[in-house]
Image (cartoon, rainbow, N blue to C red):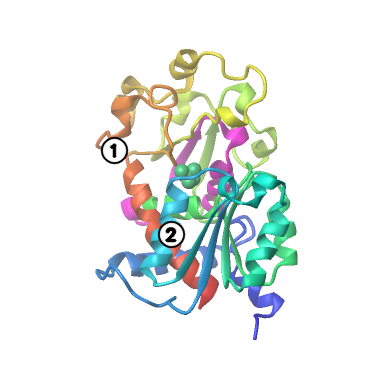
């Protein structure tokens, strides 16, 4: 027998904006549990089929979902739009319905169009997990970011977090903003005027680069060239000098401050090459933490 519509809704993870702090904490705590388990394989999800449906490119999110699912013993189907009937014109909706009709128990989905995921979720009867939708939300990225911050600081309340860069195109910025504020973190935004999202100013102030560097966490964002229209980003070096985390700026950070970036990084643009693996950088730790976070999310979707 299938799940009720309510159960599907509760097990889906479309974003963090509508999740409570308690619900987020439950995922973070469960991720800590999986993180502490030493066994590589724990077949808790062996009776379930999961489809990873990526209609937009990915390395970290796609492979860490797959790693998480396989560590839990799930039967994994990987779907890449470029090698599918999407190339013949099949819609995202028909693709998802096709996999659903074959019997998947949950779907992980990344797509570009904003608003489409919420519509899909109303029409399918298996839990959906958002692996990034347009510039709307990237909930598992923000969960792994929060998890990484908690590992360092113990708690999020009162933490000063600056999100710096291409805010306008960033689903990572939005999911982090929504989640961090639920825990009492003080979020500031910093972006060139043509990369700001004006609607977010009601939730967090835009500050100068110098002010943004006075933080416990500086979260650098990738300049998302593929989403830019026109000549928004004509000179990489100008951007680096004004908004990049250069070696000189990294030296000005507080000794306890963390450097984060969701990656992929544009080395030498929003962050200097030498800063990516700076002692205060947690960029590769973030990627590592993506696996236990996604184990917790897939368990929540299925068990
Ligand atoms: N951080 C992130 O979402 O990376 P990918 O696009 O490689 O999944």
Residue nearer the viewer, 198 or 268:
268
Asked whether the viewer can see residue 146, the reply is no
Q: Secondary structure at mark 1?
A: loop
Q: What range is drawn magenta here?
A: 151-180
- Residue 196 lies, in percent from the top left, at 62, 29
The residue singled out by tag 2 in the image is 66
The residue singled out by tag 1 in the image is 280
Q: Is residue 253 above or below residue 156?
A: above
Mark toward the viewer: 2 or 1:
2
Q: Is residue 252 above or below residue 26?
A: above
Residue nearer the viewer, 248 or 302:
302
Residue nearer the viewer, 46 or 190:
46
Q: Is residue 166 above or below residue 95?
A: above
Quadrant in the picture for residue 46? bottom left
Is residue 138 toward the left or the right of residue 254 in the image?
right
Q: Residue at x 49, y 18 (%)?
A: 239
Residue 167 sits inside the magenta stretch: yes
Q: Residue furthest bottom?
A: 1
- Residue 32 lies, in percent from the top left, at 35, 65
């Amino acid at each position: 027998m299938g799940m009720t519509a309510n159960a599907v809704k509760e097990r889906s993870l479309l974003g963090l904006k509508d999740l409570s702090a308690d619900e987020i904490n439950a995922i973070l705590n469960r991720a800590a549990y999986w993180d502490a388990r030493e066994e590589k394989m724990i077949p808790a999800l062996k009776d379930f089929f999961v489809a990873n449906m990526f209609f937009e490119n990915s390395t970290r999110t796609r492979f860490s979902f797959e790693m998480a699912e396989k560590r839990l013993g799930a039967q994994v189907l990987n779907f890449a739009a470029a090698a599918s009937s999407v190339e013949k014109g099949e819609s995202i909706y028909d693709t998802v319905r096709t996999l659903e009709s074959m019997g998947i128990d949950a779907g992980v989905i990344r797509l570009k169009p904003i608003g489409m995921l919420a519509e899909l979720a109303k029409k399918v009867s298996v839990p959906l997990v958002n692996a990034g939708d347009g510039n709307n939300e990237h909930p598992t990225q923000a969960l792994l970011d929060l998890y990484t911050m908690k590992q360092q600081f113990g708690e999020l309340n009162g933490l000063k977090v600056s999100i710096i860069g291409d805010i306008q195109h960033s689903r990572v910025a939005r999911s982090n903003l929504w989640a961090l504020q639920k825990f009492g973190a003080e979020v500031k935004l910093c972006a060139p005027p043509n990369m700001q999202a004006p609607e977010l100013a009601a939730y967090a102030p835009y500050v100068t680069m110098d002010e943004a560097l006075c933080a416990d966490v500086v979260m650098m964002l990738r300049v998302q060239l593929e989403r830019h229209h026109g000549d928004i980003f004509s000179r990489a070096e100008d951007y680096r000098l004004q908004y990049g985390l250069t070696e000189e700026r990294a030296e000005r950070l507080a000794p306890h401050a963390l450097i984060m970036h969701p990656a992929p990084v544009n080395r030498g643009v929003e962050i200097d090459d030498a800063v990516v693996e700076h002692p205060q950088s947690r960029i590769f730790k973030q990627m590592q933490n993506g696996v236990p976070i996604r184990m917790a999310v897939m368990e929540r979707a299925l068990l």
